[in-house]
Image (tube, rainbow, N blue to C red):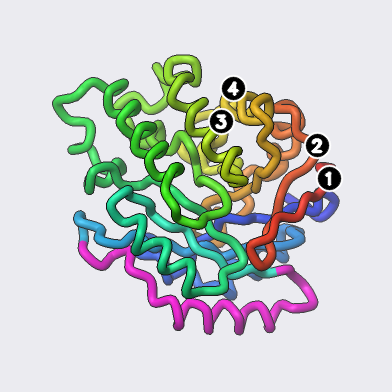
Amino acid sequence: MDLRSLHLYDMHTHTHFSGDSEAMPSAMAQKACDLGLTGICFTDHLDIDYKETPGLFDLDIPAYKKEILQVKEQFTEKLDIGWGIELGLQPYLAEKNAQVIAENDFDFVIGSTHVVKQIDIYFPPYYEGRKEDDCYLEYFEETLKNAQSDVDFDVYGHLDYVVRYGPNKNKYYSYKKFADIIDEILRTLIAKGKGIELNMAGFKYGLGHAHPTMETLRRYKELGGEIITIGSDGHAPEQMAWEFEKAPVILKAAGFDYFTVFHNRKPEFIKLP
């Protein structure tokens, strides 16, 4: 796959600074070059107070910044590299998360819901003994609370992430079933000048679509949303730019003419090829 003609950026990537990755930043950058990407942003995890395995998603921010800036210098003539973060949001952590952002000069900040009421939705116990739709609704309710918080993120990550891990994944899921709460999330983000991402990992997980679904993407555009980044959510070099050749097609079908990248927390709009 050669993506040079598409001039795309992968704005959601992870390295060994994330508790669920062993990838070296230099290897991720080299893979991006090999694929013909124009740029990438490293967005390693910080999930404060992670109960499942305490400390797993702590982030050594000074060491992380140092290594990313070294890689940025190494690839300066080949690849546009940004330094970002993916914040695991929970309502009771809003003040702590806001402080992290205030104290650092990230290029880009993704806010994501990975944990609901201190339970990681990746694991089966979140769903056990409960109706799947109730679990999904609770996830979206928690996402709305996070969107309404004062945490200064730029885009909300993988908006329907929960369907990766539910007992039936997306078999019985649809935007329409949860339209009221999803619309409220989208309106909140738009009103606050925040965007969403087209997270291509949905294809990697066998969903047959990116996060969020086409219906949600179209609704975001209908409501006035303009800020949308593209990310692989890659945790290894072989996951970089996952099925990115589909991304422009998906975005155009949803009504977008541009995709978004961030430098110094400022959105830049690039016309879709």
Kind of residue at badge 4: Glu
Q: Which residue is mark 3?
A: 209
Residue 177 lies, with reference to residue 226, above or below; the image says above
Cα distance in 3D space between marks 3 and 2: 20 Å
Quarter of image, res 49:
bottom left
Residue 157 included in the magenta stretch of the image = no
What is the number of callouts on the image? 4
Cα distance in 3D space between marks 4 and 1: 22 Å
Kind of residue at badge 2: Asp
Bounds of the magenta segment: 54-80
Left or right: residue 133 versus residue 222 is left
- The reply to whether the C-beta atoms of the residues labelled 4 and 1 are less than 8 Å apart is no
Q: Position of residue 104 (x, y in %)?
A: 51, 74
Which residue is at the front of the view, 85 or 129? Answer: 85
- How crowded pointer 2 is (Cα within 10 Å; few <14, some 14-19, many 20+) is rated as some
Q: Which residue is mark 4?
A: 215
Left or right: residue 227 versus residue 202 is right
Residue 103 lies, with reference to residue 172, above or below; the image says below
Q: Earlier in the sequence, mark 3 or mark 4?
A: 3
Q: Which residue is mark 1?
A: 271
Q: Which residue is mark 2?
A: 257
